[in-house]
Amino acid sequence: MSKVFKILILPGDGIGPEVMAEVSKLMQAVEKSSGVKFETTFDDIGGAAYERYGSPLDKTTLDTAKQSHAVLLGAVGGEKWDNLEFSLKPEQGLLRIRKELELFANLRPAMCFESMVDASSLKPELVAGLDIMIVRELTGGIYFGNPRGIETLADGTRQGVNTQTYNTKEIQRVARVAFELARKRDNRVVSCEKSNVMESGILWREEVTAIHNNEYKDVELAHMYADNCAMQLVRNPKQFDVIVTDNLFGDILSDEASMLTGSLGMLPSASLGEIDENNFRKALYEPVHGSAPDIAGQGIANPIACILSFAMCLKYSFEMNDQAEKISQAVNDVLAAGHRTKDLIGNSEINLSTQEMGDKIIDTFIKLG
Ligand code: IPM
Ligand code: MG
């Protein structure tokens, strides 16, 4: 009997469905090559879910997600839904699925493929061989803290409120994920916060230090203020191995890191929960890029981030490292042959459509055997 993995696919909005279509094709190739079976269910999230269910994340969708081995997500958001009441906005669907599945650790690798060195806005020598892993806390901090809202004060002035909170448990569990990952890489962690101005940052630094002292003495740990980290990422990005940081700083630093690799269209991510008693961990995989409404529907979006997110799924959820490696290799080979989608500015590029790029990667994947 071959293994069967249940996967919920949520293409979402904008370019989400376009890039996810390429992943669906790739899944079939992986099935053939590995003998496993993917049992896929498709559903909506974000604006598409609002249109269908009147909510950016329907309860039935969430139930299916909870019963799946993994969730693959495209992107959410678009102008059309900008004026909806806050709780109905597409982004709320994404935040809710992360929170409800307790996907507290968001892994965002920033790797520079050899053939993409020239596409970075930084000098080639700064990014060649770059391999950073950003671990972003994903279910806490200012994204979820209370009180929050927009209130009107006695004098009629309006005031927007959001609250940053972190407790020991939230910091400890994400720190452990970062240290564990570091042990399998270059064994170095930089923890980022703003402990110079925020109490939550002070606690963050204390807890990360304590976990390090008690459990991970063998890993090298350094602390950095988040603003300094933003600067260091463009000054000398190769100084980093694993960066662990909170939800908001992680959102910003990972967008910044993505441009080191040439395009936001290249960066995958994995959002992981706690490992349960059956050694199972809930997980959702999505590209770091958004729904890119400006190019949606034109067939020019880069499917690589979504394809690499599926590769992360194979690695982190299904222990299919060989297949994951092969996808990565196929992407590298296709890029090395000079193939580019429009977002990747190279010298000798032939601009491929989303579908053509997907096909090239799948063909190469199949040829790798
Ligand atoms: C991301 C995105 C999301 C976030 C948005 C779309 C809610 O920017 O995944 O980085 O802020 O987390
Ligand atoms: Mg972001």
Image: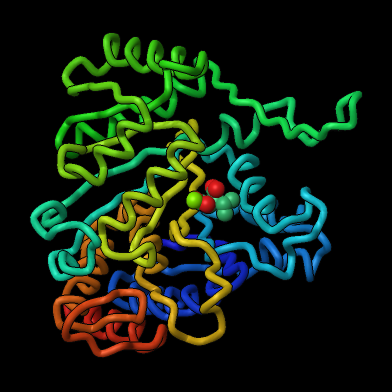
- In the rendered image, the vertical position of residue 26 relative to residue 129, given as above or below: below
- In the rendered image, the vertical position of residue 7 relative to residue 156, given as above or below: below
**Total count of labels:** 0
Q: Residue at x 51, y 78 (%)?
A: 295
- Frontmost residue, 187 versus 327: 187
Image quadrant of residue 368?
bottom left
Q: Residue at x 61, y 37 (%)?
A: 143
Q: Position of residue 7 (x, y in %)?
A: 52, 62
- In the rendered image, the vertical position of residue 99 relative to residue 162, given as above or below: below
Quadrant where the C terminus sits is: bottom left
Image quadrant of residue 147?
top right
Q: Residue at x 59, y 25 (%)?
A: 164
Q: Position of residue 196 (x, y in %)?
A: 41, 16
Image quadrant of residue 124?
bottom left
Q: How is the image coloured?
A: rainbow
- Frontmost residue, 296 versus 332: 296
Q: Residue at x 76, y 57 (%)?
A: 58
Q: Is residue 369 visible?
A: no
Q: Position of residue 53 (x, y in %)?
A: 81, 64
Q: Is residue 8 left or right of residue 155?
A: left
Q: Position of residue 291 (x, y in %)?
A: 55, 67
Q: Is residue 99 left or right of residue 336?
A: right
Q: Is residue 228 visible?
A: yes
Quadrant where the N terminus sits is: bottom left
